[in-house]
Image (cartoon, rainbow, N blue to C red):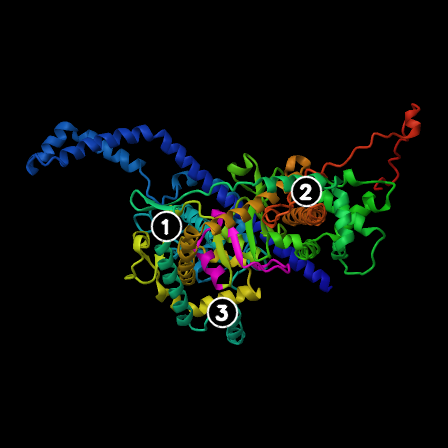
Amino acid sequence: MATLAAFVHCLEATAHDDAVEVLEMLLRDVFATARKEDRKTRLRTIKDLDKAAALLADACQVVLDTQLADENVRNELFAKVPRPMLSQALQEVINLIRPPDDVFYNELSDRYRRIRRFLPFVLESLQFGASPAGMPVVAAYEWLRTHPGRFKDDDDVPRDVIRKRWARYVIREDGTIDHRAYTFCVLDELKIALHRRDVYITPSWKYADPRAGLLKGDEWENSRPIICRTLNLSPIASPTLTAITRELDETYRSVALRLPNNPDVRFEGDGDLVITPLDKLDEPESLIALRAAVNARMPRVDIEEVLLEIATRTGFTDAFTHLTERSARAADLPISVCAVLLAEACNTGFEPFIRADVPALKRSRLLWVDQNYFRDETITTASAALVSAQNHIALAHAWGGGEVASADGMRFVVPVRTVHAAANPKYFGRERGVTWYNLVSDQFTGLNDITVPGTLRDSLVLLGVVLEQPTELQPTQIMTDTGAYSDVVFGLFRLLGYRFCPRLADVGGTRFWRIDANADYGELNAISRHRINMGLIEEHWDDILRLVGSLKLGTISAHGIMRTLQIGDRPTGLARAIAEFGRIEKTLHTLTYIDDEAKRRGTLTQLNRGEGRHSVARAIFHGKRGELRQRYQEGQEDQLGALGLVLNIVVLWNTIYMEAILDQLRSEDFPVKSEDVERLSPLIHEHINMLGRYSFAVPEAVSRGELRPLRNPAEDDSD
């Protein structure tokens, strides 16, 4: 009974998630289509707008002519542009121009019938909760639920949800409410509130209240001293802010002092900061020779043999436990586990691995193993064991000590109908897809990953990927491409004890912030015009500590809370305070980034490791044209988790053999320089056969011209 109750609760949460995801998808489609239609309409009317604007320009020239007396302006104006033509041109412009925050209501209203088709089911099925910021949205939503028809003039319609951009359409001249416009207004605000998690649903996995797990009351009071000691933060704001103020001032002064001697940094035009792009590192002859010698000695091997060998060396298959947690193990279970792993990672399905004459590779065995042994927790535990094995190899420490990691996304087209994918023509063409977001250590191992529909902003998932990684490595320096750039991310990473180090593609467009308005930073004065609001940080310091403490202890979801902290439309005071703190850290990072070529090159090197790992992933994930064809998120996560696990296996296997080859080369007096070893990479795969082998042997009876035995449809052919 307990299992049944848990199952129903989990299924209800999953059903809520799917329903809200469909709702979000429909709303995005409706509003995006309206935006496209408005753009087309404006393109069709651009000639009319140009003609009317030209007439108004002629009229303005007369008005601005200082040679004309004021009393003669009107006569001259109407002589040049007749009054009827001027009135018509003015009306034409009024009809065609759009306000900056236009909601495209004319195009939306044409889709009201579509809205009315699904809205009653939504109102009947979903009940939302809300934070204070989302209360007006929920109140309006509940009003629509209880008033399915048109409003009466004397109805007390909730108006707090009507923002300025909607007021011109929703509120008529007589003060009454337009029912159709009000419905679109509520749905637009609901779409925004769901994205920010100001509106949530219970029970739910994705759309639950991200603030529910925040430490509070006695629990927070007891945890505050421990959190402050762990994160090296002071219980009151002033000591921490004094220290970071001093750090910022000293960094400004030291960078300004070295700036005249830094040939890579210069100011152009109106004080725009420019950094010379990094040149490609030359590869010495010794490195080329060493790489060729290593590649020539790598054994040629089939991918399945790599998995079985690493299973023997590390026992990673022991992490795959039965769903019932029974300890009994089937015969040759590691072989079955490796076969299922490859079927998922290579995206081929089970068919190429089935052998009716091998019990561990029968179809029924592989299906049983897949259903009972493969889930997120077993894949994660097995991957952590491989990361640990890599960390105990001396060669891996020549590449890095595990203190550095980078995060980047890999895109997969999902050609099947599913709500767990989204569109982006740049990456998916006419199809929809997902992004597999990875955290990769400086030892080339994958530490954690997450699968998100479409191409969600990296900053939304980055913090969760870092905080929730379960391996023994604890990287403190996190490098990303420009996509994960945000002030809030900078602030949270610094507060949590990490250093966020994104690659800055356009330093000239970066804002530099200062605390001391009177400090003299030499040439940097021209770009450091923006002031940090220290009072805002102090005002919210306790809430900041409570948030980072909850994140550190894992009582709240990093991914969910990041949505509520996005700086944009109507940010909370806490979000603005964290962003202010983040601007200090961002300025520190940018200053050291332009000052230190080694830091810029180190960031690029680590990001290249992530991209190289994705190249190997493409080679492994070769089946079905490299498209992900799982309809449900759990299936997507399990399949891409298997891909990440196989990647870690390949990296570990390569590292083991590369170390053995280097030992052999040293024994043969081959010149092996440590600086060359540091530039080797285990992301090589030309020696590994990913595509399987084909047997050209036929049964003896067939070779004599006889037919194969026909199948009996009455028999079970699962073997």
Which secondary structure, mark 1?
helix
Residue 58 or 236: which is nearer the viewer? 236
Give the Cα distance between marks 2 and 1. 41 Å
Residue 200 or 141: which is nearer the viewer? 200
Q: Where in the figure is residue 361, as x and y percent of width and height?
A: 82, 44
Q: Where in the figure is residue 380, as x and y percent of width and height?
A: 67, 55
Q: Is residue 473 magenta?
A: yes
Tell me which segment is drawn in magenta.
Answer: 467-495
Query: In the image, what residue occupies the spot 64% across and 59% down?
Result: 471
User: Reading the chain from its start, which is encountered first: label 3 or label 1?
Assistant: 3
User: Reading the chain from its start, which is encountered first: label 2 or label 1?
Assistant: 1
Which residue is identified by label 3?
232
Contact check, label 3 and label 1, Cβ < 8 Å: no
What residue type is disc 1 on?
Answer: Asn
Q: Is residue 63 left or right of residue 191?
A: left
Query: Above or below — where is 427 with respect to 122?
Result: above
Which residue is identified by label 2?
294
Note whether residue 148 is visible.
no
Note whether residue 5 is visible.
yes
Which secondary structure, mark 3?
loop
What residue type is disc 2 on?
Answer: Val
Which residue is identified by label 1?
261
Q: Quadrant of residue 699?
A: top right
